[in-house]
Image: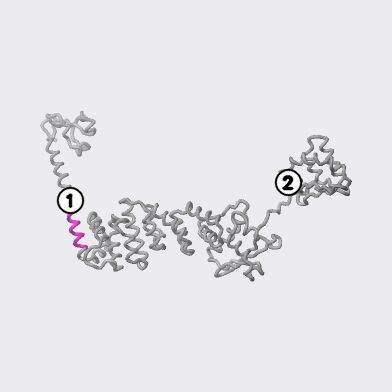
């Protein structure tokens, strides 16, 4: 609001936003009250009141809503409106179609000032965007900022067009990127299939916030049933950050990975070398890793060299080998030509130990295991035989000692009869006999053992024939 005085040519300014913005209405009460006296003293042709068209709120409507508390203030606003011919009409209905800038729709109606053409092998898509959205705010793209500041690129500057050649996986996620840039609250609609692609776009277009949001989602969302999808996408873009997340996840969850998991079939040795370094170091983990690596090497026999194979099966990673994976690992080692001497390798020694400790299971194996045994070198078979005999002898010695102990216990008692009234010393009855329920014939009387705490199920038997013993 501004006016001119005849002599002083002084001006008084009140921004139009002050009149129409709702958050300023309370301040208008004092503002209009202070200005009323001055305005009424000026001639109409020396004063002009400007109100922003987009608000469609007049001083009269403002006065009615903010200054109706007193009759004096309402009368003052009416005088101002009448003197300077301000419309008394109220505001029009709100425009529901006014949703701000968007990349969707007719570019003539959205006032787009730049085009992005996304090329992929089979098709191309054109997006009509706004330079201000691409280069401002917390989601600004440093790539487009540098592009718009560089005037040397004549074709792009003249055509207002950027052409990007993207992988189909990334091209599919590009609309999600634009929704993220245009969203007022910067909400990212991300899922397993777009997470890695959005991270790639964050790197390619240099959008820091997008990289951060996508990476945090990957860390929280990765699981055993999704890890293969993340891995395939990460390999397309050679994304080391995503691959490190996957390796850490696999290492921490190694015991929950099935030997039939898809990730073992599609992954590279480098992923598992990194993952195993971060796995728990326990006997159970070691045996399970040996099964996983046996299956992994079967899937990728040509992808392994000496250094990689040893890294996957070294003593620090697999100090103990699962017996049903031992022969497979030995066969794979021999097939790769990693160990060709007659002397046993460190891995073969551990495999031989595991097989010898489980020789009972080895006896019951199928033809496949028999064939694997036949293919082993004589030195390995001799070592396995000697260790198996030693283990069998140790177990036989333990069985003999247990049998001898049982026989000694049996000697401590004699059969009971009605004359003796029971065991000579019920406390000496072996534990193995406490639960025996003999088959009884004839007319008999039963009595629980008085040593119920030690022999809760032991029974005294008294037969009608006193001279018959049981």
Identified at 19% across, 57% down, the residue is: 387
Identified at 14% across, 29% down, the residue is: 421
Q: In this picture, is 340 found above or below 84?
A: below
Magenta segment main secondary structure: helix
Identified at 39% across, 57% down, the residue is: 275
In magenta segment, residue 41? no
Q: In this picture, is 357 found above or below 328?
A: above
Residue 423 on image: x %, y %: 15, 32
Q: Provide the residue designation for mark 2.
A: 21
First along the sequence among labels 2 and 1 = 2
Distance of mark 2 from mark 1, alpha carbons?
Answer: 93 Å
- Residue 35 sits in which quadrant? top right
Residue 124 on image: x %, y %: 59, 68
Q: Provide the residue designation for mark 1.
A: 394
Secondary structure state at the residue bearing disc 1: helix
Residue 84 on image: x %, y %: 86, 46
Magenta stretch, residue numbers? 380-390
């Amino acid at each position: 609001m501004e006016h001119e005085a005849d002599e002083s040519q002084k001006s008084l300014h009140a921004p139009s936003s002050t009149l129409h913005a709702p958050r300023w209405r309370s301040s208008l009460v004092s503002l209009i009250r202070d200005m009323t006296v001055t305005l009424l003293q000026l001639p109409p042709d020396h004063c002009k009141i400007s109100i922003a068209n987009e608000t469609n709120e007049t001083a009269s409507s403002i006065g009615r809503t903010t200054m109706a508390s007193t009759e004096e203030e309402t009368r003052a606003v009416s005088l101002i409106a009448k003197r300077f011919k301000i419309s008394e009409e109220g505001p029009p209905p709100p425009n529901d179609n006014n949703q701000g800038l968007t990349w969707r729709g007719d570019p003539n109606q959205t006032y787009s000032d730049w085009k992005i053409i996304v090329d992929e092998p089979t098709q191309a898509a054109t997006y009509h965007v706004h330079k201000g959205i691409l280069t401002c705010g917390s989601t600004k793209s440093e790539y487009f900022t540098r592009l718009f500041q560089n005037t040397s690129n004549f074709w792009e500057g003249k055509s207002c067009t950027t052409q990007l050649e993207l992988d189909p996986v990334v091209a599919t996620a590009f609309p999600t990127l634009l929704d993220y840039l245009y969203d007022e609250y910067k909400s990212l609609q991300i899922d397993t299939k777009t997470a890695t692609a959005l991270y790639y776009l964050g790197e390619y277009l240099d959008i820091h916030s997008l990289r951060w949001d996508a990476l945090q989602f990957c860390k929280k969302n990765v699981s055993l049933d999704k890890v293969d999808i993340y891995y395939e996408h990460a390999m397309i873009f050679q994304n080391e950050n995503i691959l490190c997340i996957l390796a850490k996840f696999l290492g921490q969850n190694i015991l929950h990975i099935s030997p039939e998991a898809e990730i073992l079939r599609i992954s590279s040795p480098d992923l598992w070398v990194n993952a195993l370094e971060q796995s728990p170091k326990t006997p159970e983990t070691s045996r399970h890793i040996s099964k996983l690596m046996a299956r992994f090497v079967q899937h990728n026999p040509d992808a392994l060299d000496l250094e990689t194979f040893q890294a996957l099966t070294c003593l620090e990673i697999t100090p103990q080998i699962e017996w049903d994976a031992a022969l497979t690992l030995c066969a794979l080692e021999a097939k790769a030509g990693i160990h060709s001497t007659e002397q046993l390798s460190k891995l073969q020694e551990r495999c031989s130990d595991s097989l010898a400790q489980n020789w009972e299971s080895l006896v019951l194996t199928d033809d496949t295991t028999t064939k694997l045994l036949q293919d082993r070198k004589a030195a390995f078979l001799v070592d396995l035989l000697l260790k198996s005999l030693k283990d069998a002898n140790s177990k036989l010695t333990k069985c003999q000692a247990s049998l001898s102990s049982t026989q000694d216990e049996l000697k401590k008692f004699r059969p009971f009869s009605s004359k003796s009234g029971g065991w000579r010393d019920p406390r000496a009855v072996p534990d193995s006999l406490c639960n025996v329920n003999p088959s009884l014939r004839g007319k008999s009387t039963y009595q629980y053992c008085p040593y119920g705490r030690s022999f809760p199920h032991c029974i005294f038997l008294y037969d009608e024939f006193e001279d018959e013993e049981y």
